[in-house]
């Protein structure tokens, strides 16, 4: 049991609240032979970004991908909703969220 469900207020601005998850098991593609995508959806606009990556990427690789493709273009989100994937729950990501002042909310299955 992970605790009680939390109500998350609907965002008032684009890229204030985002939802992140992985699509894995893809056929190798692109010049870097990507086999996964980090999917990021802006809850406000329903705009989606699919960031090609590798299933084997580390938490640091994922943070750099996130920084270069989301934070640098859309700003720092206030809330990130994700599942309990170790890449999102590692000590590194916890400190990363704290530094950004971002709240992490876990989805339920």
Image (cartoon, rainbow, N blue to C red):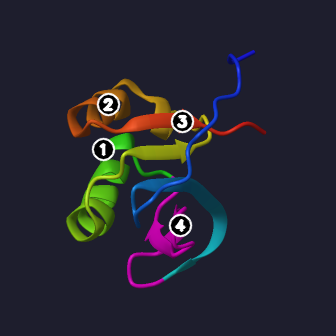
Judged from this view, the residue extending furthest toward the bottom is 30
Discs 4, 3 touching: Cβ within 8 Å: no
- Give the percent coordinates (x, y) of residue 60: 30, 44
Which residue position is annotated with label 4? Answer: 37
Question: Which one is in front in this view, the residue at disc 4 or the one at disc 3?
Answer: 3
Q: Residue at x 21, y 33 (%)?
A: 99
Q: Is residue 31 left or right of residue 8?
A: left
Which residue position is annotated with label 2? Answer: 92
Question: Which one is in front in this view, the residue at disc 2 or the one at disc 3?
Answer: 3
Discs 2, 3 touching: Cβ within 8 Å: no
- Local packing at callout 1 (Cα closer than 10 Å; few below 14, some 14-19, many 20+) is few
Task: Judge whether 98 appears above or below 27 on screen.
Answer: above
- Give the percent coordinates (x, y) of residue 109: 78, 39
Find out whether residue 17 is within the magenta segment: no
The alpha-carbon separation of the residues under discs 4 and 2 comes to 20 Å
Which residue position is annotated with label 3? Answer: 105
The alpha-carbon separation of the residues under discs 4 and 3 comes to 21 Å
The alpha-carbon separation of the residues under discs 1 and 2 comes to 8 Å
Question: Which one is in front in this view, the residue at disc 3 or the one at disc 1?
Answer: 3
Task: Judge whether 47 appears above or below 65 on screen.
Answer: below
Which residue position is annotated with label 1? Answer: 60
Discs 3, 1 touching: Cβ within 8 Å: no
């Amino acid at each position: 049991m992970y605790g009680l469900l939390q109500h998350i207020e609907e965002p008032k601005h684009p890229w204030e609240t985002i939802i992140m998850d992985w699509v894995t098991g893809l056929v190798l593609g692109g010049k870097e032979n990507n086999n996964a995508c980090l999917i990021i959806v802006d809850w406000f606009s329903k705009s989606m970004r699919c960031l090609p990556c590798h299933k084997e990427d580390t938490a640091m690789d994922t943070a750099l991908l996130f920084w270069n493709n989301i934070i640098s273009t859309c700003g720092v989100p206030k809330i990130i909703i994700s599942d309990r994937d170790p890449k999102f729950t590692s000590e590194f990501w916890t400190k990363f969220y704290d530094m950004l002042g971002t709240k992490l909310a876990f989805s339920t299955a």
